[in-house]
Structures are given as C-alpha cells and as structure tokens.
C-alpha cells in the first residue's frame, strides 16, 4: 500500500491512500531508550486491548537512535508482517505507518538516569543480534524467548531498572492462565513519564 510522507517544520506526517488517519510526530522528540506504545489496526491488536482493558495500546518497543536514523526494537508473533517471529530492528517510519498504526504514545524514564536508557538499548540490540524468537508461552521467566512487553521490561531490568517493580498481572486468557507483564502495567510505571502522544 502506497504511503505519502510529508516533511514540514521538523514533523513527519504519514497518510496512506486508503485514508487511514495521519500519524504525526517530530523526530527530534525521540531519544535513545524511549519506550513507544502502539495501537495496531489488525485483529490481534483488538484482542490484546480487549484482554488488557487498562490500555488503549496493543504493542510496545524501544527506540534505538543510530547516527541520523531512528529505529524501534520490538517483537511480534510470526506472520506475513513479522516474518519468522524474531526480534526486529525496524525504521520508525515503518513502525508508525498508518496502515499498521492508529495511534501511539512515547514515554521515557522520568528522571535523569544517566546511561541506563542507552544500556537498555544495548541489551535490546543484543536480542536482535541473537535472533531471539517470540515466546508463544508468554513466560516472563524464560528470557530465551520474549514477548513484546517482556522485551522492554527485561532490557531495562538488565540495565538495573525494574519498570514494573515486580508486579506481574494475573490474567486468564482464553488459552493462557498465569502472570504476565501487561502493557497497562508499563504505562502506569512510576519510572516513566509521557513525552508525546498521537491519539488512538
């Protein structure tokens, strides 16, 4: 699907030819280690939001700035879009393309924590280089495989910040029952503050 990109006053405006809502953001706002929450447009996104009623977002990743480029490190289950279900390092413009995204929010550590965000990015980058697979069991104790919130949490945990302060949510999914790291838990983290939002 063809996407139109317009650059104006340091902002990027995305709108696809199907008429999906514009995704507007300023690249200068993004910092290395920021956490980006996304609301997807597919059925899986609708399911995630229905299970996690405390969040309007269905996916999350970590911002990785490299020279003049901005990437998102994240993981999705195997699909036509996410290929083999591996950790991805994807250009921000692709992550926020309007055919995939209806809105997003950008968060970062609320106080100056020195090198912690960049260390979290280094950990997340190592997940990408190791080609870590998606964790279909959603077991936050098994870091050999990851799901999206676990990737963000574990990258920061390895950098010595526990974004959820050990508070895992007990949820009964249709096919799963146990404790999980939910998007709403990350959104409520005492360690994070909202930086920017493009409403869902």
Image (cartoon, rainbow, N blue to C red):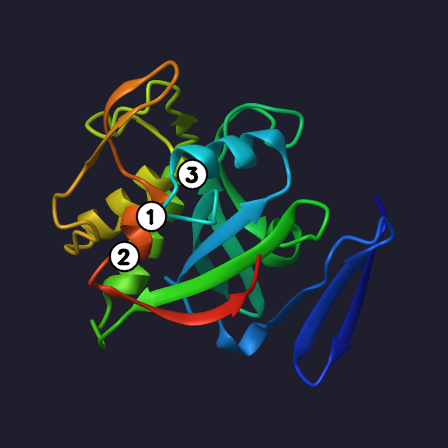
Q: Which mark is residue 129?
A: 3
Q: CA distance from mark 1 to mark 2?
A: 6 Å
Q: CA distance from mark 1 to mark 3?
A: 28 Å
SS category of the residue bearing label 2? loop
Q: Position of residue 68 (x, y in %)?
A: 57, 70
Chain-order first, disc 1 or disc 3: 3
- Which numbered disc, 1 or 3, marks the residue closer to the eye? 1
Neighbor class of circle 2 (other Cα within 10 Å; few <14, some 14-19, many 20+) is some
Q: Which mark is residue 188?
A: 2
Which residue: 66% across, 51% down? 94
Residue furthest to the bottom in view is 9
Q: Is residue 140 above or below residue 187?
A: above
Q: Quadrant of the N terminus?
A: top right
Q: Position of residue 108 (x, y in %)?
A: 34, 67
Q: CA distance from mark 3 to mark 2?
A: 30 Å
As drawn, is 168 to the left or to the right of 36?
left
Q: Are marks 1 and 2 in contact (CB under 8 Å)?
A: yes
As drawn, is 46 to the left or to the right of 13?
left
Q: Position of residue 165 (x, y in %)?
A: 13, 50
Residue furthest to the top in view is 175
Q: Quadrant of the C terminus?
A: bottom right
As drawn, is 197 to the left or to the right of 171?
right
Q: Residue beneath label 1, please?
A: 184
Q: Is residue 53 above or below residue 170?
A: below
- Which numbered disc, 3 or 2, marks the residue closer to the eye? 2
Q: Which mark is residue 49?
A: none
Neighbor class of circle 1 (other Cα within 10 Å; few <14, some 14-19, many 20+) is some
SS category of the residue bearing label 3? helix
**Residue 34's quadrant in the figure?**
bottom left
């Amino acid at each position: 699907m063809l996407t139109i990109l317009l650059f104006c006053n340091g902002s990027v405006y995305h709108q696809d030819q199907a008429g999906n809502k514009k995704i507007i953001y300023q690249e200068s706002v993004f910092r290395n280690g920021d956490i980006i929450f996304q609301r997807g447009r597919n059925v899986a996104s609708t399911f995630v939001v229905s299970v996690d009623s405390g969040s309007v977002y269905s996916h999350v990743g970590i911002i990785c700035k490299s020279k003049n480029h901005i990437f998102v490190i994240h993981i999705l289950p195997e699909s036509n879009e996410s290929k083999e279900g591996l950790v991805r390092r994807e250009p921000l413009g692709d992550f926020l393309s309007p055919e995939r995204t209806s809105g997003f929010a950008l968060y970062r550590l609320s106080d100056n924590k020195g090198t912690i965000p960049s260390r979290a990015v280094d950990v997340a980058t190592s997940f990408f280089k190791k080609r870590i697979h998606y964790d279909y069991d959603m077991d936050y104790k098994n870091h050999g495989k990851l799901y999206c919130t676990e990737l963000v949490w574990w990258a920061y945990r390895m950098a010595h910040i526990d974004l959820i302060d050990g508070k895992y949510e007990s949820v009964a999914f249709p096919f799963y029952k146990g404790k999980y790291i939910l998007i709403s838990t990350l959104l409520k983290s005492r360690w994070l503050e909202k930086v920017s939002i493009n409403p869902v």
